[in-house]
Amino acid sequence: GDLLPADGVLIQGNDLKIDESALTGESDHVRKSLDKDPLLLSGTHVMEGSGRMVVTAVGVNSQSGIIFTLLGATGDDEDDKRDRRGG
């Protein structure tokens, strides 16, 4: 159940299965391997196995960060306060 904190590419894996339901809504676990589907996305959970990845994006540049930005959930309280004050 470890949460992936960043996007990346799998470089070493052992029977790795990922829960991508937070991003895709699909409840089935996705098998990841070097030759088939090596992309790992932030906000997903490792359900089985182990692996190593090269990080390609973090924060607002990651897949989950892009989604949160598009939804307007940036978490920037100062902007929210200014909007409510009208300036």
Image (tube, rainbow, N blue to C red):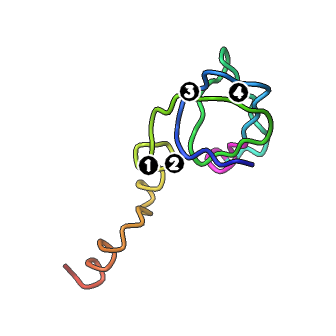
Residue at the (76%, 34%) spot, across then down:
17
Residue 76 rendering spot, x and y as whole percentages: 36, 67
Prevailing secondary structure of the magenta residues: helix
| Sequence-first tag of 3 and 2 | 3
Check disc 1 and report the residue beneath it: 59
| Sequence-first tag of 3 and 1 | 3
Residue 83 rendering spot, x and y as whole percentages: 28, 77
Badge 3 marks a residue whose secondary structure is: strand
Tell me the number on the disc at residue 64: 2
For discs 2 and 1, the disc positioned in front in the rendered view: 1
How far apart are the alpha carbons under marks 2 and 4?
19 Å
Query: Do the numbered discs 3 and 2 sit on residues whose CB atoms are within 8 Å?
Result: no
Check disc 4 and report the residue beneath it: 32
The amino acid pointed to by label 4 is Lys
How far apart are the alpha carbons under marks 2 and 1?
8 Å
The answer to if 4 sits in the magenta stretch is no
Left or right, 66 with reference to 37: left
| Sequence-first tag of 2 and 4 | 4
The amino acid pointed to by label 1 is Gly
For discs 3 and 2, the disc positioned in front in the rendered view: 3
Residue 70 rendering spot, x and y as whole percentages: 42, 54
Residue 56 position (above or below residue 86): above
The amino acid pointed to by label 3 is Val
Q: Residues within 10 Å of mark 2 (few under 14, many from 20)?
A: many
